[in-house]
Image: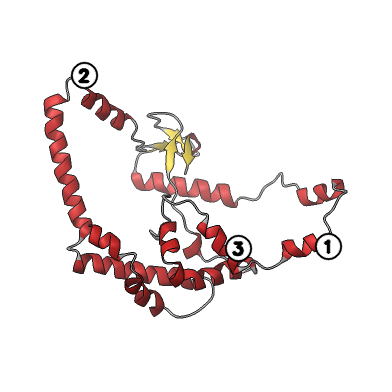
Amino acid sequence: MDDFNESIWRLDILEHPFNEVEGNGLGVLSSKLKNVKTKLRDLNKQEFSNISYRAVEIQRDLEDKARVTWLEEGDASTAFFNSRHKVQTTKNTILSIKDRQENLLADYQKVNEEAMEFYKELFTAPRKDYVNYEEKLGENITKKIGANNVQALQAAITSVEIEKALMQMKEGKTPRPNGFLVEFYKHSWSLVKGEVFEDVKTFFAGSQIPMSLNSTTLVLIPKNDCLQNEGIHAYFML
């Protein structure tokens, strides 16, 4: 496992699949990272005996051992029993919800569809109470910045600013759906910085972000413990 973890940071392994994809503009970085991800998966299977599969097997072995411990100590009010009880009660599985018509949905696919429709409507519906705050603020602001400050604020973003912002990003965060952590960008900066610079500058110049770069993973967490049979509004979205 350690050998594989070390290999994914080696630029000589990453460079070839990264540079196989040609082109420029928004979305090229995403395509290059997708190609790197595919090559790393092949490396995992061919050179390291499919680490993912081995990890699952180890997990199953640990679960079997845990069951034995449970049989021995599960009924006693021990630290083991209390710790297992805590783990079980903190699980947030959504078994059923109510749709917007108060119909109970217990089918996984229908629960998923209801959640998708709820947030799609929430984030795309026009605001009936929309107020043009820009105009209202302009009416009440008497002190304005000078021309030099305006020019500085409107100046194109620089590569130095982009690199500084990325290097200040906190590590150890959950990866995006493509699986790449901020640690990857920092470690492989000499390889990826050209595409990162281009993508960020193109975006600030007014280009639309491709779906491949703007995707995310949403998780619904109940606002109260053991909450079931409620509508989507009863859940936090992370």
Task: Say what amino acid the circle numbered 2 marks.
Answer: Ser
The residue that mark 1 highlights is 147
Q: Of circles 3 and 2, which is in front?
A: 3
Front residue (pair 87, 96):
87
The residue that mark 3 highlights is 161
Of the two numbered discs 3 and 1 on the same chain, state the one appearing first in sequence. 1
Task: Say what amino acid the circle numbered 3 marks.
Answer: Glu
Circle 1 SS class = helix
Q: Of circles 2 and 1, which is in front?
A: 1
The number of callouts visible is 3
Structural distance between the alpha carbons of marks 2 and 1: 72 Å
Q: In the image, what residue occupies the spot 42% across and 58% down?
A: 183
**On screen, residue 169 above or below 74:** below
**Residue at the limit of the structure toward the right, as seen here:** 142
Looking at the picture, how far across and down is residue 115, in whole percent? 45, 45
**Tag of residue 29:** none
Q: Residues within 10 Å of mark 3 (few under 14, many from 20)?
A: few
Looking at the picture, how far across and down is residue 18, in whole percent? 39, 74
Looking at the picture, how far across and down is residue 44, in whole percent? 24, 64
